[in-house]
Amino acid sequence: MNIKRTLEKSAIWIVLALAVGGGIWGLMQLGAPTAVDGNKTELTEPISAEDWTKGSVMAKVVLVEYSDFQCPACAAYFPYVKQISNKYSDKVLIVYKNYPLPQHQQSKLAATYAEAAGNQGRFWEMHDKLFENQDKWSDNNNAEEIFKGYARELGLNETKLAEDIKSSAIENKIEKDIDSGNKSGVDRTPTFFLNGKKLTELQTLNDLEYYVSQAIK
Amino acid sequence: MSAKLSSKLIAGIFALISFVGFLDATYLTILHYRGAVPTCIIVHGCSNVTTSKFSTVANIPVALLGSLYYLTVLVLAVAYFDSKKEIILKWISQLTIIGLVASAYFVFLQIFVIKYICIYCMASATTSTLLFITGRFVKPEKNASDDLETLAN
């Protein structure tokens, strides 16, 4: 009787240990990086001369990012993309495309300012400022004043900036980016396409560089 | 007899729900330590919650605290099956109050402060609420003599 009871007691704790251990193991597998699933979704829209690019146009590796300036995940990836750009400047072409999400109230305005800065040859500088300071303007009702401040810091022509902000050309370009993202199955930000294939298995920030370095080899 | 069955059932529900809560919170904890950032998904909130300043307390991710909370409830529920001591169910019942208050606070933060909803956090709020409700079924009038009686058996 005692032996039976002892066995029962032991069994209870063994089941618990197996369930907890197995659960943790399974969850860790879920979070582990795996190979790129290249067959899933492809970038259907080709990159164009209108797109903002950084790196060598001769590069055999092209990394297209659909991003949202107000998305915290995009801000988290920002230094990693920049690091890739610096490290592999002659091997990778980075392409930025706007995909402002509807739940981010300042996102489209931020994209508009980045595009307007781009019209004066300072897209990437504004891009960097927006991501570096995301927490300062993200929930700020006066975000536009902050954006104007960045424009002044970059020495942009304020008259031209004001004209461009109001122009439908920039709005159309952002809409075109969103449309191209939708056609390529973008439903979240950031979404990366490496040589036209969506990186669907990114789990950590470092995974991005891993996949890029694999593509370069 | 029915009281015993009821206690077993309560302990079973505690174990089941806390296991689900444990998996949920542990998943977020693993993502946190791996440095993974859940992407911003169109329309359905995004990583605003899990990357907000409220996601850690003194550098400890709240997901880990949640994970430990559920694990404690789970271990105590199993300890009940092992020892049949009713007092353990009362401990769990009291613990669930802390879980409910913490969850209510995090739901409040999501809705009114961060203004985004994290589905995993809401799942955790659901499991901790269910644990709290289950805790209300634990008989409060049980006294120490019952435990001694159980131990004698």
Image: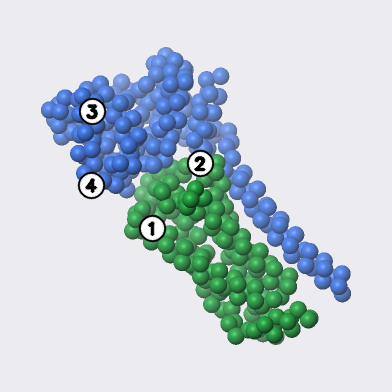
Chain colours: A blue, B green
User: Are the residues at dot 4 and dot 1 in contact (C-beta closer than 8 Å)?
Assistant: no
Q: Is residue A167 above or below residue B21?
A: above
Nearest to N terminus: mark 3 or mark 4: 4
Labels 3, 4: one chain: yes
Q: Are discs 3 and 1 less than 8 Å apart at CB?
A: no
The residue lying at 27 percent from left, 37 percent from top is A110
The amino acid sitting under disc 2 is Ala
Tag 4 secondary structure? loop
Between the residue at mark 2 and the residue at mark 4, the CA separation in whole angstroms equals 30 Å
Q: What's the CA distance linking mark 4 and mark 1? A: 20 Å
Determine whether, in the image, residue A68 is placed left or right of residue A13: left
Q: Do discs 3 and 1 share a chain?
A: no
Marks 3 and 2 sit apart, C-alpha to C-alpha, by 33 Å
The amino acid beneath tag 1 is: Leu
Mark number, residue B109: 1
Q: Horizontal and vertical percent for residue A204?
A: 52, 38
The label shown at residue B36 is 2
Q: For the C terminus of chain B, which image quadrant?
A: bottom right
Which of the two marks, 3 or 4, is nearer to us in this view? 3
Few, some or many residues within 10 Å of mark 2 (<14, 14–19, 20+) = many
The spot of residue A67 in percent (x, y) is 37, 35
